[in-house]
Amino acid sequence: MRPLKAPGRIVEALLDQPWLNKYQIARKLGLSYSRTHEAIARLEKNGFLVSREIGKSKAGLPVKAYALSLAGLSAALFYDPARWKKIDEIAEKNKHLLPMIFGKWDLFKKHRCDEYIVLRLKNILKSVAVSSDQGEPFSNQHLAKVVQEEILAPESAPKGLILAIISDPELKRYSELTHERRLLMARHLSESMEKGLEAIKSGNPDLLIRERETRLKNGSFRSRLDRLKEIEREIDKLFAMKFQS
């Protein structure tokens, strides 16, 4: 096996021990500071790291600590599948990445649905890793929301996952909000498609514009849009609280 280059070694180090600063990473890996700085800059540019300020240097400059982003974790697991064997340890050390999953890992293990979640994660994170390789940028928080929605609000789920969600107020509320949002969006999309087909069949594209203007003034349509916005705000608030914890 070929030795990893500096960026790969940094990914491995942060997978094992998140939230290290550049000096700690350089010392841990035996790299020069300049080489560490260059590798971290490259990883940050590609969206593989997240950072947070942990203090000031003697010169008054911000000192940052680094951890893998969800895209970085996806790449680490995709290119070395053997790491999945350490998922319990990874979940414990990387709660900041998937707070509603890794942060609830003991609960999922208690209800024996952790193996199901690992299978779902493997499929989802594989897609994330491939997309990252193709240069598609990701917002870590947005990506976490997408991944967690896929796992925690599926069309069908094993009994253990359902019991885990019901037993936890945060998971239960999140699942309720997500399903309500899906129903509202499905209804919204269905109505839009119906009106679009009517406009196409009539040969009058202006009909679609007039219909949209009418619907925007319609009370039930407006209330549905307002409710969707409320749901998004509540989900965002729930995630923000978990990301800050």
Image (tube, grey):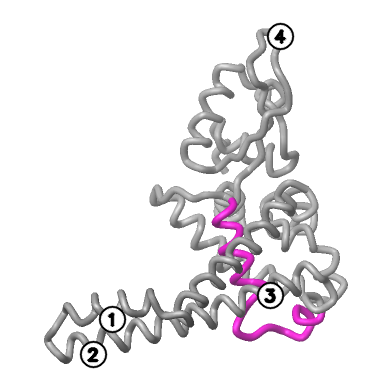
Q: Residues within 10 Å of mark 3 (few under 14, many from 20)?
A: many
Q: Nearer the viewer, mark 1 or mark 3?
A: 1
Q: Mark 4 or mark 2, which is nearer the start of the sequence?
A: 4
Q: Mark 3 or mark 1, which is nearer the start of the sequence?
A: 3
For the residues bearing labels 4 and 3, Cβ distance under 8 angstroms: no
Label 1 and label 2: CA atoms lie apart by 10 Å
For the residues bearing labels 1 and 3, Cβ distance under 8 angstroms: no
Q: Which residue is mark 1?
A: 211
Local SS, label 2: helix
For the residues bearing labels 2 and 3, Cβ distance under 8 angstroms: no
Label 4 and label 3: CA atoms lie apart by 47 Å
Residue located 63% across and 58% down the image: 236
Q: Which residue is mark 4?
A: 58
State which region is magenta.
141-163
Q: Which residue is mark 3?
A: 175
Q: Amino acid at mark 4?
A: Lys
